[in-house]
Amino acid sequence: MPDRKSVNTTCRMCGTLCGITAHIENNRVVDIEGNPEHLFSKGRTCIKGSSAVTWLNRPDRIFKPLKRNMAGEFEEIELERAMDEIAAKLIEIQKKYGDNAIGIWKGEGIDFAQQENLARRFAHAVGTPNYFSNDTQCYASRHIAFHLVYGCWPLADYANADLIINWGTNAPISHSHWMQAINEGREKGAKLMVVDTRYTEIARQADLYVQIRPGTDGALAWGIIREMIEHDEIDHDFVDNFTVGYDKVVEYAQGFSRERVSQITGVSESLISRITDEIAQARPRLASWAGCGLEHQINGVNNIRTITMIDALAGATDRKGGMRIPMGFGLPELTLYKEKPLTELDPIGAKRFPVLYEMRQECHTGLLMDQIISEKPYPFKGLVMTAANPALTNANSAKVRKALSKLELLVVKDLFITETALLADYVIPAASYLEREEMFFNGALRAAFITGKYLDYGLQTEYEFVKGLAERMGAGEYFPWKDDHELNEWLLKPTGYTTADLHTAPGGFIFGENPCEKHLNKLTTGEKRFFDTPTGKIEFYSAHLEAKNIPGIDGLPQYHPPHYLAEPDPDYPILLSTGARKQKFFHGRYRNIPQLYKAEPHGHLEMHPEDAKTLGLKDGDRVRVTSRIGSFETLAQVMHEKEIVRGTMQHTHGFADENVNEVTYDDVSDPISGFPVLKSIQVRVEKL
Ligand code: SF4
């Protein structure tokens, strides 16, 4: 009789966290379907999620640790011996070059909620401040922008909104769990507005689609703000009581007439008026989202700050149907930034991008590559990576390969051999999301989700990995918990709940209500701090940011033109955007799932039909794309004229044979977040 079970858990094939039911037979997953009782995915899964059955059972999955031998080839090694050797080498590097000559990098490939803070804890426990993650290429810029204004990241209450704005984001593909709430809101009568350079899947569903030139979103947002002020569509009570800097906003917005904004953005004057009318009619039930399409510009943080200010000016903050303010859970701090800040050890990137380090407490992955190569300001020699693949997914692949190859020790923990694992000295097999206990917390819903160890291949979990290394490096006292489960019980303890409580509701265990209008209650009780910013108010103007003295950065999110307009390069007349996702893949992952690979084996350069005509190209023609740092070859894809702005092209990342990051330069970046310009790389394109 086969040993069968069905478990309700969470899919971790991407960051969306859909609820699934996994059917398991004889310690093998045999089917995956959506869990309709899950709080936000409500039974929905995508093709990646269900393809996990193939992925997790692939014959090339790594089950034995590998070590590179003298001939440069991988050979199997026992786990304990590999751990001993890795720890010994890390200690040797620290003794020879300094404690900060090593670091740890948390990737996305394993997707383990406690992975980030465990990696941060490990770094500081063993004496280095150098913690890295892919968030410095995607995500952190928006985190900084929202936190500068609100002190948190407000979450859109789509299901109760009257107007939903998706700005530079494509929910059906990259945040598919939102679609349940977006559809619910629309069924109740909400309108959907989409602002994007590309006519995306969500744009096709919109009541109002606004096509905009890349990197000019801040100008459009200022134009909308000016219109709101002119027509007195401002929530003055809210602005007077809960914000700072409104007088400066009024003054600065005057420079953004409809005519000027239209010239900058390519959005017609009548459409700018229509956008403002829609906001005026819907406010305060205005739920908006600024996506990663906005953050890869030199003006990314300020553009996002300006866009999100519209919500507060409309009085949508902390309102039902508007922007919900998340509530914490009172969990204990897993990181060691208070006990061992280690800032004297010069965290990589902290001086060049002080706001990034202060607000994210993480080091800059792009500057890491420069530092490995130059050994300035100090040598960096040993890196432990948990399922990151920067050789494929970071800007400037050639530099990444050169830097990682120069390390004295590169350790990669992953489920499969990736482009980065191919450069490693050791590859340690990782446990999948069905092989560990993990917890996630959603501050808007006040809900927690738990998974369990439903498969067991005897593989080391993330916790066991960092604990094992720390113990061997003399820092075992920082990892006193026996396993993931004991750690999770410790994390939950202050809440009064246990993991057993969470397991009673794997589709979402609700801790309590997250009420709206918390700021009004605070006003009534005489409190002075309403939001977690330096002033306790929503900061349209940030004196804290201005005091950082970053060249060109004021306290107000002033609009500066994107790099391609500020410094146009006539040798590279096309603007290349990358980062748009495909539903089949997640960044560099899942091309090793045969059915997904077969459906889309190659990357494509998406272009406007007039650009194709000028270049003499038709669908499927082979082309070379060249920027000032490199080139790659790919296939042309001629889009409908409505789908992409003329003069711009798009190529999705993560295709090893058509690697767009051969042309993405990493030396032009947002001065606040350090994010590279990935949405308007200046390139030329030629037919082969
Ligand atoms: S969107 Fe797909 S891959 Fe992502 S969590 Fe949901 S089912 Fe899994």
Image (spheres, rainbow, N blue to C red):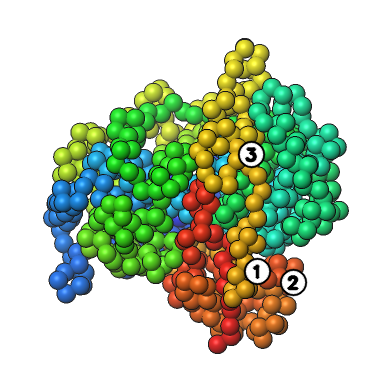
Which amino acid, by three-letter code, is at mark 2? Glu
CB contact under 8 Å: marks 3 and 1 = no
The residue shown at (24%, 40%) is 127
The residue shown at (37%, 31%) is 333
In this orientation, does residue 684 appear?
yes
Q: Secondary structure at mark 2?
A: loop
Q: Which residue is mark 1?
A: 648
Q: Tell me the quadrant of the picture where the N terminus can be found.
A: bottom left
Residue 357, image x, y percentages: 43, 42
Can you say whether 307 is above or below 86 in the image? above
Q: Which mark is residue 147?
A: none
Find residue 380 and report its image quarter. Answer: bottom left
Q: Tell me the quadrant of the picture where the C terminus can be found.
A: bottom right
Q: Which residue is mark 3?
A: 556
- Is residue 509 found left or right of 323 in the rendered image? left
- Name the mark nearer the viewer: 1 or 2: 1
Residue 450, image x, y percentages: 42, 39
Separation of residues labelled 2 and 3 (CA atoms): 36 Å
- Is residue 550 found left or right of 199 in the rendered image? left
